[in-house]
Image: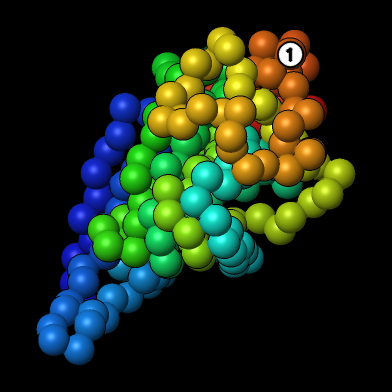
């Protein structure tokens, strides 16, 4: 249907993906995911689960989350409606970008997708109301392997672009450990050329 535009980011193994979009006076059409096109672009990930969340207000902050152990997930992320500031943190010890973060604007207007490898913490802030957020995962959700770090981690100094005292978040997310607290028992390991990204 059309070639994918793939842009490398400053973070190791993270990519911005822009599918071809065909628009006219009626609206637009895009193939938001094609396994064939992704494989042709060198992205051979088998996605097994789609997750969909709705945030009705601007200022909702979700994260920073990840799955550990055998449940670790690679994700393909996009905003179907609205606009988000998407934030990821490299949690993989040994990675050239370990402990680094980046933020990206994903929206219904730019049609950008973010490919996030296993071993990254992920979160987002809604910049508009009524954000429909969709992401594909290459592994199923596991409650016992659910983990996360605080979006307020002082060591990371993430610029969320708002006063975090006014962020709308869950009680669970507000109680997550900081990056430094989690680092003591961090199971994620990066080895170049090795598919192993975590060990428990």
Q: Position of residue 37 (x, y in %)?
A: 31, 67
Q: Identify the residue at the far right of this view.
A: 144
Is residue 61 toward the left or the right of residue 87 in the image?
right
Is residue 140 toward the left or the right of residue 164 in the image?
right
Residue shown at the point (42%, 17%) measured from the top left: 96
Question: Toward the viewer: 123 or 7?
Answer: 123
Is residue 43 toward the left or the right of residue 165 in the image?
left
Residue shown at the point (69%, 18%) measured from the top left: 178
Q: Is residue 182 above or below residue 7?
A: above
Q: Position of residue 132 (x, y in %)?
A: 51, 65
Reading the image, the residue beneath label 1 is 181
Question: Toward the viewer: 24 or 75?
Answer: 24
SS at circle 1: helix
Q: Is residue 78 above or below residue 64?
A: below
- Label 1 neighbourhood size at 10 Å, few (<14), some (14-19), many (20+)? few
- Please state, as top left, top right, bottom left or bottom right, where the C terminus lies in the image: top right
Residue shown at the point (27%, 62%) measured from the top left: 109
- Please state, as top left, top right, bottom left or bottom right, where the N terminus lies in the image: bottom left
Q: Is residue 18 above or below residue 163?
A: below
Is residue 175 toward the left or the right of residue 107 in the image?
right
């Amino acid at each position: 249907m059309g070639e994918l535009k793939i842009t490398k980011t400053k973070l190791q193994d993270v990519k911005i993906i822009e599918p071809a979009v065909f628009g006219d006076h009626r609206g637009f059409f895009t193939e938001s995911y094609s396994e064939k096109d992704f494989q042709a672009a060198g992205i051979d990930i088998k996605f097994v689960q789609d997750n969909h969340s709705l945030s009705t207000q601007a200022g909702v902050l979700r994260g920073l989350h990840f799955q550990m152990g055998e449940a670790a997930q690679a994700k393909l992320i996009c905003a179907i409606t609205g606009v988000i500031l998407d934030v990821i943190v490299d949690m993989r010890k040994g990675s050239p970008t370990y402990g680094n973060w980046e933020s990206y604007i994903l929206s219904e207007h730019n049609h950008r997708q973010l490919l996030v490898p296993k071993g990254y913490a992920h979160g987002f802030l809604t910049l508009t109301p009524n954000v429909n957020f969709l992401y594909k995962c290459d592994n199923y959700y596991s409650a016992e392997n659910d983990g996360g770090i605080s979006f307020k981690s002082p060591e990371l100094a993430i610029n969320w672009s708002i006063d975090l005292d006014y962020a709308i978040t869950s009680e669970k997310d507000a109680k997550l450990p900081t990056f430094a607290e989690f680092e003591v028992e961090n199971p994620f390991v990066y080895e170049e050329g090795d598919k192993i990204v975590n060990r428990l």
